[in-house]
Amino acid sequence: MKLTLKIWRQGGEYKKGQFVNYQLDQVSEHMSFLEMLYVLNEQLISQGKEPVAFEHDCREGICGACSMVINGHAHGPLQGTTACQLHMRFFRDGQTVTIEPFRAKSFPVIKDLVVDRSAFDRIIQAGGYVSVGTGQAQDANAIPVEKDQSSMAFDAAACIGCGACVAACPNASAMLFVSAKVSHLTLLPQGKVEAKKRVLSMVRQMDLEGFGNCSNVTACEAECPKGISVENIARMNREYLASVFSSEED
């Protein structure tokens, strides 16, 4: 299979970037998308050219590091799939494949397809945790949790923080990511003690990072590789309003 790769090349956050076309022959349909990029980089290195910088780690759809926009879709055209799980059999011979980084002010480009997503880390540090005393761990059955609540919490906890929701949103909103983290903890008994403080702190940090507002386009849910529901955004909004009014009463 022959492909034309149209790849965004940029030396850093404040450097000018541009799309560069590359021709790649003998691409096997059994290759993963990342393996295809490795073949391209071997070709570039053999020609004495700079290889394309891209990020990856687990290759199992767990870490979200392989974030890139492929033909206009975060992680590529296949739903419920990260870029590392995408295979070349989903592309056609002779096709032009456009590859670019996640584009958001809060995700500055480090180099080529690699962006800095540490804004997500700072949001988690602001409140995405449960404070517990150290010592002997409680028995797993000591705190009963209703099945519906545990299922919703588990679904929200599936978020891998890749940033596809931000890349897909026309406003570069991080609401799906933040709401997933808020829902995951707030739905469980262990997280209810700090629920008010958590949602206020995380939303405040999200705004400080420069992410946009949600306008209910729902592109975030459509592009999310883990299928995180926008119902979490509605839940977070309710939690936020309740916490704001509660704080004013106090």
Image (cartoon, rainbow, N blue to C red):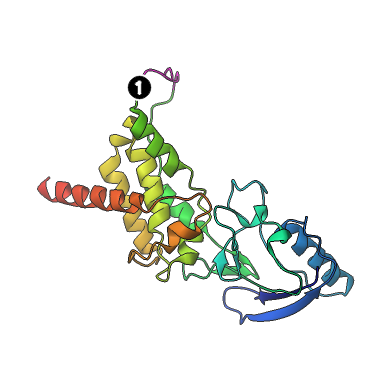
> Percent position (x, y) of residue 20?
71, 80
* Residue lying at 37% horizontally and 18% vertically, measured from the top left: 142
The question of residue 103 being in magenta is answered with no
User: How would you rate the neighbour count of disc 1 (Cα within 10 Å): few for under 14, some for 14-19, many for 20 or more?
Assistant: few
> Percent position (x, y) of residue 89?
72, 59
Q: Outermost residue toward the right?
A: 46
The question of residue 142 being in magenta is answered with yes
* Displayed quadrant of residue 157: top left
Q: Which quadrant does the N terminus fall into?
A: bottom right
Q: Is residue 169 left or right of residue 53?
A: left
* Residue lying at 43% horizontally and 66% vertically, measured from the top left: 169
> Percent position (x, y) of residue 99?
64, 70
Q: Is residue 120 left or right of residue 68?
A: left
* Displayed quadrant of residue 70: bottom right
* Residue lying at 60% horizontally and 63% vertically, measured from the top left: 76
Taken as a whole, is the magenta stretch helix, strand or loop?
loop
> Percent position (x, y) of residue 42?
84, 65
> What's the amino acid at mark 1?
Ile
Reading the image, the residue beneath label 1 is: 143
Q: Is residue 159 above or below residue 153?
A: below
Secondary-structure class at tag 1? loop
Q: Outermost residue toward the left?
A: 249
Magenta stretch: give its range.
Answer: 135-143
